[in-house]
Amino acid sequence: MYTAFVFIAIAIVLAIIGLAAVRFLHRQAAHQDEVKSAPVDMLRYRVPEGQDPAIVVAALQKEGFEAIPDVQGAGASHDVLVPCGEGVEQHRAHVRSIIQSTEQINFEGDQRQIPQVKFADE
């Protein structure tokens, strides 16, 4: 009897965690769609192949930018979108310096040099 109670309690806890995770992912996807469709100028940075776009996103968010990853499809390139409410030219140099100064580690854990940071509109 006690064992059945434990299994039911574990099942309930796992269900709650699963629902919370689904809700979180749904809100995150909705926020990304909202940012992408907003009528705001954006800088688009194509992350070099083998690099983790999360590192760039985290560095930009740490500096106060609302950067979001934009995956183009399975096996395709990874871009990082940076909304710039006051216009891209106001933030281009600052965003470039943040990306250039981030410690880039590839998926194998090796440090890599970042090539010259270029945005999609350059």
Image (cartoon, rainbow, N blue to C red):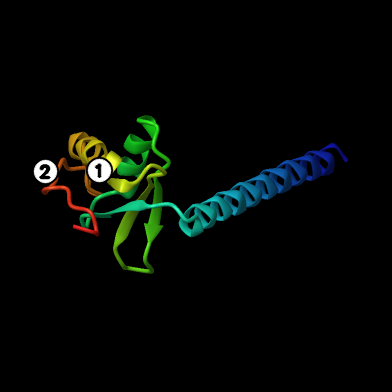
- Under circle 2, the secondary element is loop
Residue 30 found in image quarter: bottom right
Q: In the rendered view of the protein, which quadrant contains the N terminus? A: top right
Q: Residue at x 69, y 45 (%)?
A: 14
**Rendered location of residue 103, percent (x, y):** 21, 35
Tell me if 104 is positioned left or right of 57 in this view: left
**Mark 2 Cα-neighbour bin, 10 Å: few <14, some 14–19, many ≥20:** few
- Under circle 1, the secondary element is helix
> Which residue lies most toward the right here?
1
Foreground residue among 112 and 67: 67
Pointer 1 residue: 92
> Which residue lies most toward the top here?
63
Tell me if 2 is positioned left or right of 110 in this view: right
**Rendered location of residue 117, percent (x, y):** 17, 48
Q: Are the residues flagged by discs 2 and 1 in contact, CB closer than 8 Å?
A: no
Kindly identify which numbered label has been placed on residue 113.
Answer: 2
Q: Nearer the viewer, mark 2 or mark 1?
A: 1
**Rendered location of residue 56, percent (x, y):** 30, 42
Disc 2 residue type (three-letter): Gln
Q: Residue at x 18, y 57 (%)?
A: 122
**Mark 1 Cα-neighbour bin, 10 Å: few <14, some 14–19, many ≥20:** some
